[in-house]
Image (spheres, coloured by chain):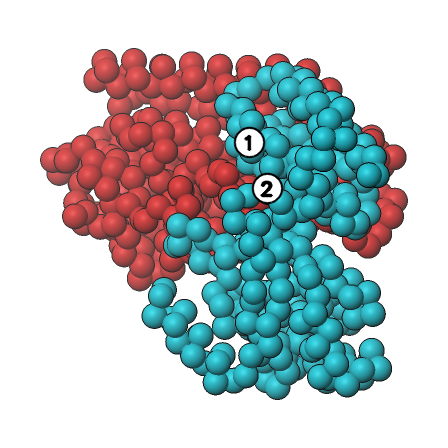
Chain colours: A cyan, B red
Amino acid sequence: MSPRPACDIEALADDAWLLRFGDRIDPELNAAAHAMAARLRASNPSWLRDLVPAFASLGVFFDAAEDPARVHEALRALIDDVQASAELRLPLHAGEGANSSAANVVEIPVLYGGEHGPDLESSAIELGLAPDELVRRHTAGDYTVAMIGFAPGFPYLSGLDPALALPRLATPRARVDAGSVAIGGAQTGIYPRESPGGWRLLGRTPWVLFDATRERPSRLQPGDRVRFVAIDAAEFERIAAQQDAAS
Amino acid sequence: MRQLHVLSPGLQTTVQDHGRSGWRHLGIAHAGALDSDAARLANRLVGNDASAAVFELTLRGPTLRFDAPARIAIVGASASARFEGERVGGGRPVDLPAGTLEIGSLRGGARAWLAIDGGIDVATVLGSRSTDLRGGFGGWQGRALRAGDVLPLGVGLRLDTDTPHAPAWWIDPAHDSHEPIRYRPSAHPAATALARRGWNVSASSNRQGLRLQGLALASPGGDGVSEPVAPGTIQLPADGCPIVLLADAQTVGGYTKLGHVIAADLPRLAQCVPGQPLHFAPVDGATAYRLACAARTRIARIGVMIDARLAAV
């Protein structure tokens, strides 16, 4: 087993520390961030307010009334403990134990191409693939929610086939439909809400990914594993109607 | 149920409280009053719970018609407020009969918080009544007030008054605006250079971030690997002009970080007006903690004083 990535603690705010595992997009560093988040969540110290896993770091927000030095000590001790017990094979995969739903693979239905995926054809041409082959490879991927950010509920999914990496649009669109499934650089993601955006739009899911009025506002959680399943227009309409009825 | 009619919305008036905590991992911003101490004191003046929702006013306040008596308090930048033509002072509880309150322009700062007894009774979304402007939820329909809006007020003091009334005392929790803004520098080489230059507040600043103008710092340019950011984070985008993130900040970002503004000085950033000169001074973590504790004590003391004054009425 490879050694655990080192972990530095940096100041993020007066009420937050940043645990840094590295400075590059790397599944192992991301897994370390999710695993540390799971450990902290499990130990549930009274000062803990929020945990924000990112590609290679973890934001730890704590009660502003707490002495940051004391929280720093507690974090250092936890990190040392995790690193000392590396051979015990604590959950390393991003999905395992990151949260209760993470053991499941979330299958997201996507209608590829046409008006819902206006960049599918041009992206396929740019990659030297047939559109069907681009869809096949995109749906073959085993993705992880590396982090959620940019907008509420926007999942950054790692695990994209490197052959499908595409630069962002030179001029971002002023309006991207909610549910648009897209590629931006070496990642794929889903726009949870209508917004501007510069990623290449391959298709669209009828799912409502984010709704602030739901008890669980985000359909996806950091660390979740994701697969895309291609659906046809009829299926899209059927699921979309169900979503409307549910909301 | 008492209602509030928005006759004129002001420049950007939003419903805010203490903000959303515990949802950053889902990309949900903190939001909340840019100076939560001022909002808390305004609530205290009108007898509200500290977590009641208030209005945050920006540069120019709204004109509001009350359909029933209310106790109000304005804390923050001074306002040239008038009720049916009569002057209304800030920093104190003011009892108003039904009628029209015109807040007008703010002076000596960019923001003020208007508390009303009973609070602004909008729905709680994810633990807060604050408006998330970027996410489009919370507060009043997820947006700033517009003319014609009618907002519900919570059950308050059930005042019965037919003339405006205010006590002779007031509080002024204003901060010293001439001191530099203190920050904890990051390890980045440009982090200490921030303190060696003078900056101006850009007109494009908003609740998401305070944008600085000045002699640009050397920037590595482009996006790095996105990592968590927080209110107070000082970002250095490609153009070399820093951005200090505020309460509506996104939760992750890829720009170089120069450090963060300390908690004790975040309320001062809420008062920065476009064009205002701004200086920064580096401090260490122990100093930041000491100043945060001192600020909490100071606000607590003002709170106790308010209670004593109110009890004496």
Q: Residue at x 46, y 39 (%)?
A: B19
Q: Residue at x 81, y 43 (%)?
A: A23
Between residues A220 and B57, which one lies in front from this camera angle?
A: A220
Q: Residue at x 16, y 48 (%)?
A: B1
Between residues A134 and B254, which one lies in front from this camera angle?
A: A134
Using the rendered image of the protein, determine whether residue A201 is visible from the camera's viewpoint: yes
Which chain is indicated by disc 1? A
Q: Which residue is mark 1?
A: A42
Note whether B96 is above or below B297 in the view shown: below
Note whether B39 is above or below B273 in the view shown: above
Pointer 1 or 2: first along the chain: 1
Provide residue B264's location: percent of width, then percent of height: 58, 25
Label 2: how many Cα within 10 Å (few below 14, some 14–19, many 20+): many
Q: Secondary structure at mark 2?
A: loop
Q: Is A94 placed left or right of B43 in the picture?
A: right
Disc 2 residue type? Answer: Gly
Disc 1 residue type? Answer: Ala
Which chain is indicated by disc 2? A
Q: Are marks 1 and 2 in contact (CB under 8 Å)?
A: yes
Q: Secondary structure at mark 1?
A: helix
Provide residue A212's location: percent of width, then percent of height: 43, 54
Q: How many marks?
A: 2
Q: Which residue is mark 2?
A: A97
Note whether B304 is above or below B229 in the view shown: above
Provide residue A136's location: percent of width, then percent of height: 70, 77
